[in-house]
Amino acid sequence: MHIRLIAVGDRQPSWVDSAFDDYAERLPRQWQFRLESVATMKRQKNASADASKLAEADKILSRIRPPEHAVLLDERGTQFTSKELADKIDGWQTVGEDIVFVIGGPDGVAQSVQARANTCWSLSKLTLPHGLARVLFAEQIYRAWSLMNGHPYHRE
């Protein structure tokens, strides 16, 4: 199983990169985890948010391979406990699915990305800055790995 994160937004504050990298480096090598950034579309003066979302969607969808299990991170998605997330990842791993997680841009994602998603996961009902969502995502993926492997990082 391989895991990727496709995230819209090419520039993050240094604290985001540092915290994200700290958790990403802890993940098992066999997952071959990597982050793929998609540039945020620059909005023209009178352009709609929909135009930006459609342009970003084209870039996102071009990076998702057909057999991958796509998980869209969205505040309207299903919330999981850390244990439930670990069980989901373990299930996907058991059947040999590669997983791609997607964090959309500041205006969200187009319907075409939502339609491609196999799972829609909410980190929180709160609206989060994209950098913070990246860090929370990386921490929760590491926590899921620790639960799956009996590592003492997670405490009940």
Image: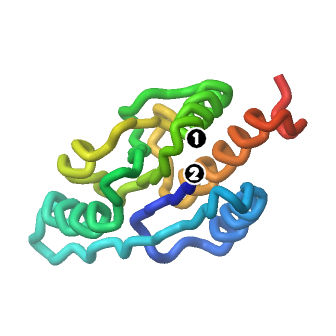
Task: List the single residue furthest toward the top.
Answer: 156
Q: Is residue 62 left or right of residue 5?
A: left
Type of residue at label 2? Met
In the shown orientation, is residue 146 left or right of residue 48?
right
Kind of residue sitting beneath label 1: Gln
Horizontally, residue 105 falls left or right of residue 93, namely left
Q: Which mark is residue 84?
A: none
Residue furthest to the right in view is 152
What residue would you read off at disc 2?
Answer: 1
| Residue located at (54% from left, 51% from top) | 133
Q: Position of residue 113 (x, y in %)?
A: 26, 51
Q: Residue at x 62, y 63 (%)?
A: 32
Q: Nearer the viewer, residue 4 or 97?
A: 97
- Give how far apart the Cα atoms at labels 1 and 2 are: 6 Å
Q: Are marks 1 and 2 in contact (CB under 8 Å)?
A: yes
Q: Across the whole image, how many numbered discs are drawn on residues? A: 2
Residue at the front extreme of this rendering: 95
Q: For numbered disc 2, what is the local secondary structure?
A: loop
Instruction: Identify residue for label 1.
Output: 93
Residue found at x 19% / y 50%: 112
